């Protein structure tokens, strides 16, 4: 008798077994579990606006739900109306003119990231990935057979990768540069000049660029968003833009993102998606059309609230002994260093030697959820989202200050 599959082979494939759980979602899940058990937990973990989706967007979904045309399969690449809206919005907001045929609508920006690396990478191809980085990037690169090459940044450059650092990390296997501005987790925003300089370097090197623009509308003060292919047109034929409605329109649960790129790459990614998930839910797509083509006042209102919370979080973190923090410039995260806290007794007598341990103690002792920097390739730091109510922000940072005192 032949041996059974269960005794001959591992239960999981090696590529799936190597995937790490999303640290941000894991922290959020632990916090919600404690809340469900009756604990008063304040979560700074999830990258999710605390606002409801604007009413006119919800109304569009309610109108779309009874319509039979939305109950059927539609093109895997997305509803034509939404692809047109994304193309128009991209030209208007960033100055990057694209055709609707260059747009693929995906199940959130995460699927756009996955599709992109699957479409571009062969085994062994290297991707330059400035660190700190969002937790999903390296996993998507590795699933595609690529090699993620971290390019460290720190406070001295405002957590921005320089051309010199990128050049030092580049090898003959480098195929892609990942570029993110505004940044998750640091909140750094590259100036237009810095964006153009990096783009020209990538063009001269013959690299592909994957630019994640999901936080494009969330920039503050004198900082401005700039789109690399708009500033460096010669790079457009080797650029993939990732974006979506989740952050700017408080639509994380609707799962609508997109990727924009050259026709041949988009065609390949459409083929992949046609076998993986097919089309995005039609009601969600109709809602996204309303988001992109409707009144944009809601975006400004949410941005103003995030800006107020940003300044207050920076103020409170900077006042904590042993904590150092750059003022966030975009997105809705602060990324302070806790190096001055590690190794000394906290309130209650416990000691943390890493930010991973510190995050565990903060959740257990202070009932405050933060994401340790280890998840972002930056031990000694932690990410705190300020996408939560003002009162919760004050209370949570007060608890953290008491723990660190």
Image: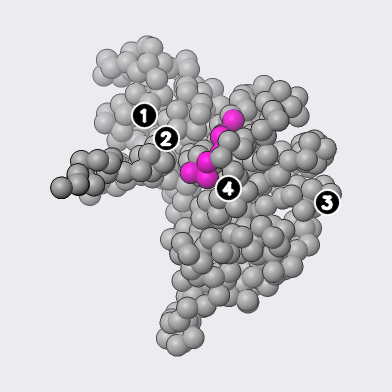
Say which of marks 3 and 2 sits in front: 3
- SS at mark 4 in the image: helix
Q: Nearer the viewer, residue 157 or 218?
A: 157
Q: Earlier in the sequence, mark 4 or mark 1?
A: 4
Q: Secondary structure at mark 2?
A: strand
- Residues in magenta, as a range: 143-149
Query: Is 253 displayed left or right of 116 in the figure?
Result: left
Q: Which numbered disc flags the more N-terminal residue, 3 or 2? A: 3
Can you tell which mark lies on residue 117? Answer: 4
On screen, residue 163 above or below 345: below
Q: Is residue 100 above or below residue 405?
A: below
Spatial CA span between label 1 and label 3? 43 Å
Q: As drawn, is 177 to the left or to the right of 41?
A: right
The CA distance from mark 2 to mark 1 is 7 Å
Q: What secondary structure is found at the residue carrying circle 1?
A: helix
- Using the image as rendered, state which of residue 102 and residue 175 is in the foreground: 175
The numbered mark at residue 359 is 1
Q: Which residue ends up furthest to the front in the rendered image?
A: 1
Q: Are marks 4 and 3 in contact (CB under 8 Å)?
A: no
């Amino acid at each position: 008798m032949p041996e059974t599959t269960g005794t001959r082979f591992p239960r999981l494939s090696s590529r799936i077994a190597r995937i790490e759980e999303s640290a941000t979602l894991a922290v959020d899940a632990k916090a919600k579990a404690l809340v469900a058990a009756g604990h008063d937990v304040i979560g700074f973990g999830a990258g999710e606006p605390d606002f409801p989706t604007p009413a006119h967007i919800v109304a569009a979904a309610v109108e779309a739900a009874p319509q039979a045309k939305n109950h059927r399969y539609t093109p895997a690449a997305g509803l034509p109306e939404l692809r047109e809206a994304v193309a128009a919005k991209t030209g208007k907001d960033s100055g990057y003119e694209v055709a609707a045929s260059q747009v693929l609508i995906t199940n959130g920006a995460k699927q756009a990231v996955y599709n992109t690396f699957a479409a571009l990478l062969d085994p062994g191809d290297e991707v330059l990935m400035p660190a700190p980085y969002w937790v999903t990037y390296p996993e998507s690169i590795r699933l595609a057979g690529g090699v993620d090459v971290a390019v460290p940044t720190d406070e001295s450059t405002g957590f921005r990768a320089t051309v010199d650092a990128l050049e030092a990390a580049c090898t003959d296997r480098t195929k892609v540069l990942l570029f993110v501005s505004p940044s998750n987790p640091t909140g750094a925003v590259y100036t237009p000049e810095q964006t153009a300089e990096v783009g020209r370097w990538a063009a001269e090197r013959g690299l592909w660029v994957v630019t994640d623009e999901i936080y494009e509308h969330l920039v503050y003060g004198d900082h401005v968003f700039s789109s690399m292919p708009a500033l460096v047109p010669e790079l457009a034929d080797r650029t993939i833009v990732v974006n979506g409605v989740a952050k700017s329109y408080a639509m994380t649960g609707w799962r609508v993102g997109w990727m924009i790129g050259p026709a041949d790459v988009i065609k390949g990614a459409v083929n992949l998606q046609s076998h993986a998930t097919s089309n995005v839910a039609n009601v969600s797509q109709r809602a996204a059309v309303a988001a992109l083509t409707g009144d944009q006042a809601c975006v400004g209102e949410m941005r103003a609230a995030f800006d107020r919370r940003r300044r207050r979080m920076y103020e409170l973190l900077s006042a904590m002994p042993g904590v150092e923090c750059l003022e966030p410039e975009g997105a809705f995260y602060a990324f302070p260093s806790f190096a001055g806290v590690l190794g000394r007794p906290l309130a209650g007598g416990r000691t943390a030697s890493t930010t991973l341990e510190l995050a565990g103690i903060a959740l257990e002792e202070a009932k405050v959820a933060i994401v340790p920097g280890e998840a972002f390739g930056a031990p000694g730091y932690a990410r705190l989202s300020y996408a939560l109510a003002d009162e919760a922000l004050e209370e949570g940072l007060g608890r953290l200050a008491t723990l660190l005192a």
